[in-house]
Image (spheres, rainbow, N blue to C red):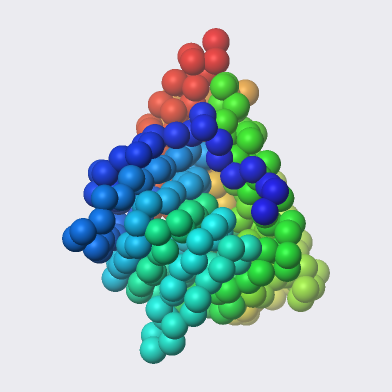
């Protein structure tokens, strides 16, 4: 393939001990164990970049190696085979992956991969919360069990738009001065591209038009996130009973009105904390502005949604602003 996927500027290890590389991968990309031939003298190579909520990794172990993990749990793995071969054991089946193929691994899938000595892979770690958050934001319907990709193996020619996008992401990741907002936008585009190009269990509302009264309520919520949003008021806006409103939200947003409002407020707070152009007096004041009266509960809900405390998001923003002057 001709699309560049991480260059020398992202190099972490070169001609290194595979176990040292594996330890680093465990910390940044996903928990796993490796099995190597006892007689081999491999020299592993690794390139890595953190890009907003994504981790980008290009890896070769330099010897035949088996990689196993019970499950990724909190993330998806997009794996692109650049050279060599990879045997993927899935259930009772075995699939031989060749260069020019992409594999999507779901969070609850056990991982069992055997690389050839010359195998080189590009891997994108995608947090579950990123895809779930996008589905909530776009009002796409997700089963209670969560997002799942029902077809996992693809030829790159069939998903060329995704591959080209990943190439742009890698170029942006290697820019000398990181731009958090640009990275965040790219990350959202990657998440959207995955859900649109790879077959999954998500039902998109652009394929199933929302009822006009539901659309009206959702638009009203987004315009009034800093105001009290009573369910009875929303029901009157939709011209239905509160009970019917709950049914509409369950059908079209896969959640309740109360939880939908909470998730939209969390998303707005996160956007403000991450955006250097948004004035933030303090995390506590911002939380109160959006109706979170119990700050400890707010912090925990924020952490569950975004994988970090709100103070950490604000700290990263300040550090980036200081670094970039």
| Viewer can see residue 279 | no
| Residue 219 visible in the shown view | yes
The picture places residue 201, in percent across and down from the top left corner, at 59, 77
Q: Identify the residue at the far top of this view.
A: 325
Q: Residue at x 53, y 71 (%)?
A: 97
Question: Based on the displayed image, in which of its 4 quarters is residue 117 positioned?
Answer: bottom left
Say left or right for 255 vs 21: right
Q: Nearer the viewer, residue 222 or 73?
A: 73
Q: Which is nearer the eye, 321 or 157?
A: 157
> Percent from the top left, x then y, of residue 320?
49, 22
Residue 241 x/y as whole percent: 64, 76
Is 28 left, or right, of 105 in this rendering? left
Which residue is situated farthest in the bottom direction here?
92
Is 282 placed above or below 102 here? Answer: above
- Name the outermost residue toward the left: 38
Residue 216: x and y in percent read 76, 61
Taking the spot 44% from the left edge, 83% from the top edge, the residue there is 94
For the C terminus, the quadrant is: top right
The residue sitting at 55% across, 36% down in the picture is 7
Image: 126 above or below 292: below
């Amino acid at each position: 393939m001709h699309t560049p996927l991480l260059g020398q500027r992202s190099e972490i290890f070169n001609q290194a001990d595979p176990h040292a590389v594996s330890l680093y991968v465990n910390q940044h990309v996903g928990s796993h164990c490796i099995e190597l031939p006892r007689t081999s003298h491999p020299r592993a190579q690794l390139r890595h970049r953190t890009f907003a909520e994504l981790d980008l990794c290009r890896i070769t172990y330099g010897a035949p190696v088996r990689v196993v993990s019970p499950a990724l749990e909190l993330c998806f793995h997009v794996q692109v085979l650049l050279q060599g071969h990879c045997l993927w054991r899935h259930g009772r089946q075995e699939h031989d992956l060749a260069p020019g193929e992409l594999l999507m691994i779901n969070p609850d899938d056990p991982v069992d991969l055997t690389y050839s000595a010359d195998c080189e892979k590009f891997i994108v770690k995608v947090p579950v919360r990123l895809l779930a958050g996008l589905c909530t934001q776009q009002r796409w319907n997700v089963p209670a069990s969560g997002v799942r990709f029902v077809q996992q193996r693809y030829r790159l020619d069939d998903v060329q738009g995704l591959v080209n996008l990943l190439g742009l992401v890698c170029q942006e990741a290697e820019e000398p001065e990181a731009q958090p907002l640009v990275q965040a936008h790219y990350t959202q585009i990657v998440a959207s591209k995955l859900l649109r190009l790879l077959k999954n269990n998500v039902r998109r509302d652009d394929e199933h038009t929302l009822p006009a009264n539901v659309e009206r309520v959702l638009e009203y919520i987004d315009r009034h996130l800093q105001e009290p949003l009573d369910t009875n008021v929303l029901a009157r806006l939709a011209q239905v009973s509160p009970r019917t409103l709950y049914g509409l939200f369950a059908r079209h947003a896969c959640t309740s009105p109360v939880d939908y409002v909470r998730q939209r407020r969390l998303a707005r707070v996160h956007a403000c904390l991450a955006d250097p152009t948004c004035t933030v007096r303090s995390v506590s004041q911002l939380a109160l502005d959006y109706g979170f009266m119990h700050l400890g509960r707010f912090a925990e809900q924020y952490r569950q949604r975004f994988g970090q405390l709100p103070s950490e998001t604000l700290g990263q923003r300040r550090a980036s602003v200081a670094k970039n002057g």
